[in-house]
Each structure stands twice: as structure tokens, then as C-alpha cells.
Amino acid sequence: MDVVVCLRRVPFTQEVDLEIDKGQRQILAENLAFVLNDWDNYALEEAISLKERTKGTVTAITVGTEEDEEVLRRALAMGADTAIRIDSEGLTLDPRNIARLLARVIRGLRFHLILTGAQSDDLNEGCVGAMLAEELGLPHASVVNKIELGEDVLEIKVELEGGIEEISTIKLPCLLTIQTGINEPRYVSVMGIRKAAKKELKVVTIEELSLDKEALVPDVYVERLFYPPETGGAEILEGDPHIVAEKILRILRERGVIS
């Protein structure tokens, strides 16, 4: 099985005090470390696992600048066969245009399956995978947490709301967005990363895709980022259950929740 897996490099923001830049449209990223998006890491492991089970190939692809090539090097170190970066230098992209760029390149590749993460750690939009499937005219499923191989089909388990799961059959070729926990991503050794640094990595420019940068003006853009307003904190209600219940009802009435 030939698999294409889409990857994204994101800032590592855990236990970090984020700052907003003067334009109030993005966070200051100069002092942040960047890593492979967590959901994409699981998608990458699933792609490589399927390759090993079916003796296929894995192509890793990302949209980004030269700095984003580190996630492709990691993919090569984990077992991907080829890596492609679509150069986005100077572009401001929204999910739709990212999907358009990915689709332009993927159309020229041989594949049975496309995998993406269910969402990204930084923006949490969760829509590039579905948009990419629509661009390519492929059947797709989101938040997949199990894949079983069939004859020209996949049996998949999808996570629904409230802990409910759904088992479906989807025809190949198709696109799946992967949920965390579907597998255990393998460890990447320093030696593996060093070897991957010597492998060829293909870079595709916007001009090679016959796209004009002016045609890639985003449909969605950030107007303003701001910190949540400070509040007085939680109010602790004390007393016996009858008194606490009366207090809750009074608060709900005062705030217009109930009449």
C-alpha cells in the first residue's frame, strides 16, 4: 500500500507564557521550540506501520518554509521513503489554500491512502484533511482510531461524541484523519536523524504548481488575538444542600440563565 502522510510543524506551547505581537494577529514565536504536530505523529506512525505490513511506500509532505523541513527529516528517520516540501515563503495561508497546495502535488503521486492528523496543536481547526479530500474527490473519514485492511477497502473505527465509536467500511483510495492513541509512535534515534539529514528532500515552488501568489489570498484570516479577560475566580457555595440549591437558583436568575 502506498501512503501519503501530511505533516505540520507547530510551536511547543506547553508550560510557556505566550506573548502576542504588536499587530495582535499572531503569537511571538522567536523563543518557542517547534515540534511535529502530535496528531500528525500518530498519522506518520500509522502510515509506516501500513507500509511495513503491505510492503508499500510512504511519502511525507508538508507546506512550509525551509525550517519546516525538520519534520520531514524526522519522517524519513522513522521510515518514510520520500519527502516533499511545498514552499510557502512569503504566503499567508488558510486551511483551504493549504488543502489546495497539497492537492496540486498529491495528484501527481501514486497512492492508495492519504493520512493527516485530526487537527493541529496550534490552531485546532481540524478542517484541512476534509478540505483536501474534497479537492481530490476522495471518500474520507475523520477522527479515526483504528484501521483494518480489507480487499480494496479499509474497516475503520471512528470516535464519536460521548465515548461512542462507529465502525465503517471505506473504499480505497481514500483519506483519513487520525486521532491520537491509535498507535504508539516509534522512537527516533539520533543516528536515524543523522542518516535522514543526508537523504534527498524535494522542494516544490508555487511557480512550479502554476499558481499565482495573488490567487492564494486567504478566505479566512485572524483579525485580532487577545488574552481572556481576568475574572474574580470561582465562588465557593457553602451550607447544606437546600441552601446551596437556593443560592444556585438565585445566581442563575440574576444572570438571566433562567427566569
Image: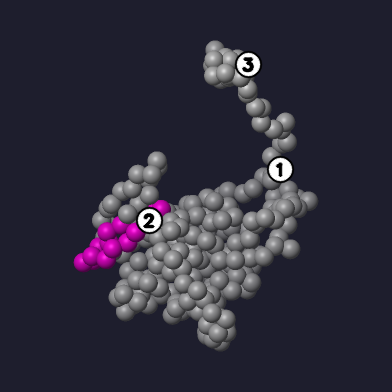
Up the image or down, 75 lies above or below 216; here it is: below
Q: Secondary structure at mark 3?
A: helix
Return the residue at label 1.
227
Q: Residue sitting at 71 percent across and 36 percent down?
A: 229
Up the image or down, 253 lies above or below 153; here it is: above
Left or right for 194, reference 134: right
- Image coordinates for residue 184, horizontal then vertical, percent: 44, 66
Numbered badge on residue 254: 3
Residue kind at label 3, given as amino acid type = Glu
Up the image or down, 238 lies above or below 226; here it is: above
Left or right for 6, reference 49: right
Q: Indicate which disc, 1 or 3, sits on the residue closer to the N terminus.
A: 1
Numbered badge on residue 150: none
Residue farthest right in this picture: 22
Numbered badge on residue 144: 2
Crowd class of label 3 (few under 14; some 14 to 19; many from 20; radius 10 Å) = few
Quadrant where the N terminus lies? bottom left
Q: Secondary structure at mark 1?
A: loop
Q: Indicate which disc, 2 or 3, sits on the residue closer to the N terminus.
A: 2
Quadrant where the C terminus lies? top right
- Image coordinates for residue 169, horizontal then vertical, percent: 25, 56
Q: Indicate which disc, 1 or 2, sits on the residue closer to the N terminus.
A: 2
Left or right for 27, reference 196: right
